[in-house]
Amino acid sequence: MTVVTRFAPSPTGFLHIGGARTALFNWLYARHHGGTFLLRIEDTDRARSTQAAVDAILDGLSWLGLMGDNEPVSQFDRKDRHAEVARQLLAEGKAYHCYASPEELDAMRAAQKAAGQPVRYDGRWRDRPASDAPEGVKPVIRLKAPQTGETVLKDEVQGTVTVQNSQLDDLILLRADGTPTYLLAVVVDDHDMGVTHVIRGDDHLTNTFRQIQIFNAMGWDLPSFSHIPLIHGPDGAKLSKRHGALGVDAYRDMGYLPEAIRNYLLRLGWGHGDDEIISTEQAIAWFGLEGIGRSPSRFDFAKLENLNAHYMRQADDGRLVALIAPRLESARGSALTEAETALLTRAMPGLKARARTVVDLAASAAFYIAPRPLALDDKARGQLNADARALLGELAALFAAESVWTAAALEARVRAFAEAKGEKLGKVAQPLRAALSGSTVSPPIFEVAELLGRDETLGRMGDASNAAPQ
Ligand code: GLU
């Protein structure tokens, strides 16, 4: 059997982090089995579905590298096929017309409530003859669901879950206006698209029993079902915005790399021993339904950030420069020059070793291309007292005469200078760091000096040593 999975978002908002995880699991399962991963946009709710949301979802999936193997299918476009299936069930006597008016159904529910009974459709049109149909009323089509026995879901994650059929009422397949219900649409689409494995959030678990009844009525094979526990916040409560229930685009804006998000989402609900860092290739090789956990996972920004730092260190330097360029450019209002891009690329190994996000990386790289005189932060300014400025002035004279402009040569020069002065290295290196980077934290400062080059380094040292006392 060729595995076919699908991701079926409703385009009523952005691609949220839980949806991204569902997409990832389906994508991985298909890749692992050499199968197909399909996308279906569940846009039957016309009032709440928007093209902007479709675009945001596809954009988020494409950024995450989780595009489907098909052109996304629009569920709404398939409404005639859904209606056809409802009519087929009607013709086969497995569904029936129900003429109950909304008022009548409200009264039915109120009476059930008052009597302390469960609220559900009581099957009042199930066995009535067509001759009873009231004039001019458009009926809905309801499934003639089994009333005895039980519906069994053999879920790959949740285990076997059973519901008594007496607890499920005759669900509506086709509304009076001829539009299909969501439950019908999902079943028809999953069948027609050849979906073999349905992997989705466990908020859909209760829908599944009703969907199984539709599959059975049509005599269609059931797909395998896996319902994944939802993602909770670090405190165990339902995921809120504060906890990270954001769109994937928000994670991109916060400076996370897609491969870090993939690794993080994978671990959020799936495990392979104690492995935390799992590359996408490894994930494809290892992924299976048996590794999906049964309890809700907790979203943890600190873990995501650690993983991101790892993937940042591994990322290609040119790619990282391209990622920080728009941030640097919009901060200063002009494009990076070729020389600046080259400088940042050379500086990237030192910069990425310290950054946790692309946002951090852009902030920590800005000093390389900042205009003189460099803006110093408060701590850097604090380093530049009169003594430090005097030392910088002397050191600048030595640097000017330096014949070899490498980090190693400059470091040797500064060490000798500090020793001759009877000072610790930091006494000289810290003011130098402040002068060159405008901060008290930076990549190794001699490397910074080498990359900035002699003229820029001497210029920045001069600016700092000549600055008015702080
Ligand atoms: N459209 C549903 C959702 O966005 C998913 C349905 C399914 O996976 O079966 O939650």
Image: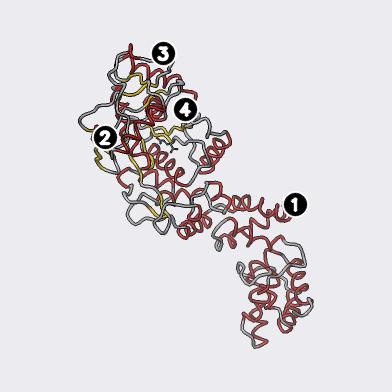
Q: Tell which tag, 4 or 3, sits nearer the viewer.
A: 3
Please name the amino acid that badge 2 sits on: Gln
Count of number-bearing discs: 4
| Furthest-left residue in this view | 149
Q: Residues within 10 Å of mark 2 (few under 14, many from 20)?
A: few
The quarter of the displayed image where residue 117 is located: top left
Circles 4 and 2 in contact, beta carbons < 8 Å: no
Q: Tell which tag, 2 or 1, sits nearer the viewer.
A: 2
Judged left or right of residue 351, residue 89 is left
Mark before the other along the chain sequence, 3 or 1: 3
Name the residue beneath numbered marker 2: 167
**Residue 334, numbered circle:** 1
Distance, label 3 to label 1, CA atoms, is 72 Å
Give the residue drawn at x 75%, y 66%: 456
Q: Residues within 10 Å of mark 1 (few under 14, many from 20)?
A: few
**Residue 135, numbered circle:** 3
Percent position of residue 389, x then y: 74, 80
Mark before the other along the chain sequence, 1 or 4: 4
Give the residue drawn at x 49%, y 49%: 259
Give the residue drawn at x 35%, y 16%: 88
Circles 3 and 1 in contact, beta carbons < 8 Å: no
